[in-house]
Image (cartoon, rainbow, N blue to C red):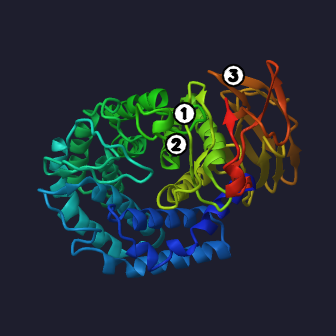
Amino acid sequence: MTNGNLDKRIKLCASRLLSDIYDYPIVLEKKDEWPGDYPGRTFLALTSLFLSLDESDLKTKIKERIDIIYSNLEKYLNKDCFFGPVFNPKKINEQQLSGNSWYIRGLCRYYEINKDPKVIEMLYSIVTRLLIPLSRYYETYPIYSREESGEVSGHLIKGNSSSWVLSSDVGCAFILLDGYVSTYEILRDKRLEEAIKNIIKSFEKIDFLSLMCQTHATLTATRAILRFYSLTKDEYYLNLVIKIFDLYLKEGMSDDYENINWFRKDGGFTWTEPCCVIDSIILSKHLYLLTKDNKYLRLLNKIYVNGVRTFQRDNGGAGCTSIIRQGIGEMKAWMYEAYFCCTLREGEGFYELSNSFLKKDNKYTFLIDEGIEDSNVTAQIDLYDKKIIKFYFKNDAEISLYVPSGFISSFETKDNFIKIVGKKGETISIDFDLEITKDGLRYLYGDMLLTKKDKHFGEIFKINGEEYSLLYDSSKFDEETLSTLVQKI
């Protein structure tokens, strides 16, 4: 189980997900232009958090909430077992497709927990009556720019001339690719395999920049392609993921390792979206695991250390931030909490982060600088606030610990890892320091951004005659105080 900062953040998020707005019947009765989105994201978040938490009253309460939502789910579904109207090829609502993707993924994760055969029946109904008949229409998805701009929550736009009902969240129809692949992972239905391949062909034809696609939708579909690669081992799909993710890093990432909500919309026209930041964390992690390219490992840690620290609020939810890009602009809270989407995406993000400690026999690999406790070892790790790395070995064990650039200790660093070998009963504390490094226009202390600000907390670093300090941890400030805090690169 995790401990330290990550454990606190997971529990903070779980406590927020126990609020009334995420309980039955509210979560299933919410009406909007996104059928399935709110209940689907909630169900996926809860099931992900359940798998992230150690045994506790909090985990028990999360499980109770999952069970009551699941037991009442069918009352809110159509006859084909999904949200909204049944499939109509003459009126394909891309927001309905997007929303139901999260619902499908939640069902798949629930099956991972309970192995309920009823879930398999529901999935086969969805496959037969939605996913397979829909798949051939993706090649007709309209690839042209849309004049209407979206808000924090996208909306259906006017003037649709084809069989598609389009969204201001450009490209969100392809979020359903995530649902296709999750279902295929469980059912291994050949029809799904062919459908996925055809949808990917349509997706890769999109010019994400000129269409100003939503970065969250783009990376969600890209995550799905990466999981499909892990199933098929077809290098074509891995190369496609790398190509799209490289484009995102160049054109869609903000200076604080968050994101721009739509490609090619900067400054006052857009904001960051934690949903996409979570996507980028997951992609970085799994690209590293599949390629062993350390640039993805370093990126994983930079996005985690800075992105989550910036977007998680004191109530456990997630909120948006203003854009700073190429040193232009400033970071400040743009929206305290996007409770209807971003808070819910935290759940899967924390699931992935809590599973970033790899174990084989008595050998461990820590992909992130966080602590854990199990039958072999207790690790306390906090590089930035408490400045501690300490291991207590309950049994003989060997640990490979990720360390950032600028990490200085008596241990040899190789490919961003140090190796610690301990004997049963031994305690090893590591004295270390962190040098300030530069990444483009950004100054980093380890992997954490140093920012200029009017109100400094903690240690102050002097760089070129100016004062910097560690990036604000938004979860330590109430909404009113957070709204007054401004940072620059």
Task: Tell me where residue 414 sits by quadrant.
Answer: top right
User: In this rendering, would 423 be left or right of 75?
Assistant: right
Q: Nearer the viewer, mark 3 or mark 2?
A: 2
What residue is shown with label 2? 272
Pick the residue in front: 255 or 408. 255
Viewed as shown, does residue 258 lie left or right of 29?
right
Residue depicted at 58% across the width and 29% down the height: 294
What amino acid does circle 1 point to?
Ser
Q: In this view, does 263 lie above or below 93?
A: above
Q: In the image, which disc is placed on residue 438? A: 3
Marker disc for residue 254: 1
Q: How far separated are the C-alphas under marks 3 and 2?
A: 23 Å
Residue at 77% x, 25% y is: 436
Q: Please identify the quarter of the rendering in which residue 153 is found.
A: bottom left
Q: Is mark 3 on a helix, strand or loop?
A: strand
Residue 426 is situated, as x and y percent measured from the top left of the image, at 88, 50
Mark 2 residue type? Thr
Q: Do the residues labelled 2 and 1 touch (CB within 8 Å)?
A: yes
- Residue 165 in picture, x, y percent from top left: 21, 52
Q: Is residue 367 visible?
A: no
